[in-house]
Amino acid sequence: DAPISRSGAAFQRARAVIPGGSMRPSSWFPPHPPYAARGEGCWVTDLEGRRLLDCSNNFFSLIHGHAFPPVVKAIQEAAALGTAFGLPTPQENGLAEAIIARAPHLEQIRFCNSGTEAVMFAIKGARAITGRSAIAKFEGAYHGAYDHMEIGYESAPGAWDGPDGDPASTPYARGTPAAVAADTVILPYGDPARCADILRRKGTRLAGIVLDPLASRIGMMPASPELLAVVQEACARDGILLIFDEVIAFRMHHAGAHTLFGVTPDLVALGKIIGGGLPAGAVAGPAARMAIYDHTGGRPGVALGGTFSANPLTMAAGMATLAAYDTAAVARLSSLGDDFRQATNAAFRAAGLKAQLAGMGALFRLHLTDAPIRDYRSVATIPAGKGAIAAVHAALLARGALLTPNASGALSTPMTAAETDLLTGWLVEVVREVTA
Ligand code: PMP
């Protein structure tokens, strides 16, 4: 027998005490992922001592890569003063002010611990403000693990439309209450006219529409101006709140993705990079909307809290991160990403490969087709299939690049054209190998 790797040994131990042997379905792939030992900048070292170019960045949460010195220092200093208190801290004011100062449309903010919580609290806020219970989201979009957001997230071809002819409200988790599915309206991302029709019929039931303008699971195509117009029109007509999920997308613009897309949402869910690599989430928006969370006048419309919400370590790491992600850093990273996707797509075409990188700015996702991608359904029916994407992922890992298992990635500020050129070369080689 070949000697077992250190990661293999770690996985064998894990299987006894952890169902499935690891903690996160989205980051698992067979036979098991390499275990991380440490990271520095855009490189991760695994237990075998192999260095990997990290394009996953813990699922896009590390804008400056690993162990960014100002963040390490900020966490160390904060930790030495105590990690969490049943009292407010000046650090929470600091990160709140730092985010509000960047985004003119966002006037107030409340922190929580994850993107899942951020979306959940935004939805609860929308329900409390409107007095309605139903929520709309786009087919295939991932917004975390709150019940309603797991509806219409993964469904099979043939079962895409429900009995009423609209996209089906298919639950993901077994045992999801029927009432949750009944209260979740699924919208087609690539078809603004059909979307408008659904919203005309169902809009007055809706408390909110949740929209990620660059949803990774849908395929990472930017929301079209037509779609944004349809959504905003329905919100204005029927009194629906627009909830932007910027858990990933906030990074796309200094003042948030809503600014980049020219939209003024009622509530914005934040997470990932605002915590500087530590667990973080937030709901932000205009003060008139955020008042629903104000608890000082007695019982609030929605109680937004949590034992570790706004803990000073996350706040300090977030402040150090955002201070170094200024307008110049955002512009540099976005243009590095635009150049990378253009160069890679040109290389795919030159090599006659049926492949494309979707995305925008520093975010990208590989699709093994040269046909246009419009929505979740067009991704799910790419002939090469998920098996080919898994093979690309594995072959990239063998060369030394870590993408997410669905072959999406993000650039981080320590990267330069040296790293993106390396990645373009590997992508062309690997796609040729897999699609041959
Ligand atoms: N919304 C989006 C768009 C996300 O990508 C994610 C996580 N990948 C979430 C929400 C949930 O965030 P978290 O994993 O921090 O709960």
Image: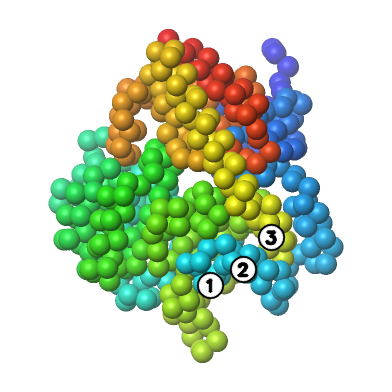
Could you classify mark 1 by the number of other residues whose Cα lies within 10 Å: few (under 14), some (14-19), or many (20 or more)?
A: some
Q: Are marks 1 and 2 in contact (CB under 8 Å)?
A: yes
Residues at marks 1 and 3 touching, judged by CB atoms closer than 8 Å: no
Q: Earlier in the sequence, mark 3 or mark 2?
A: 2
> Where is residue 153 drawn, in percent x and y?
36, 46
What residue lies at 24% left-to-right and 63% top-to-bottom? 234
Q: How is the image coloured?
A: rainbow
Q: Is residue 31 visible?
A: no
Q: Is residue 93 depicted above or below 346 in this figure?
A: below
Compute the Cα span from label 1 to label 3. 16 Å
Classed neighbour count for the residue bearing mark 3: other residues with Cα under 10 Å, few (<14), some (14–19), many (≥20): many
Q: Earlier in the sequence, mark 1 or mark 2?
A: 2
> Which residue is located at x 57 percent, y 45 percent?
331
- Image x and y of residue 353, in percent: 41, 16
Write down the residue under mark 1: 108
Residue at 70% from the left image edge and 33% from the top image edge: 43
Report which quarter residue 384 is drawn in: top left
Q: Measured from the top left, where is residue 266 in percent x and y?
A: 40, 68
Q: CA distance from mark 3 to mark 2?
A: 9 Å
Kind of residue indicated by mark 3: Met
Q: Real-space Cα distance between discs 1 and 2? A: 8 Å
Disc number at residue 319?
3
Q: Residue furthest bottom?
A: 297
Question: Crowding at label 2, few (<14), some or many (≥20) Cα neighbours within 10 Å?
Answer: many
- Which residue is disc 2 drawn over? 96
Disc 2 on helix, strand or loop? helix
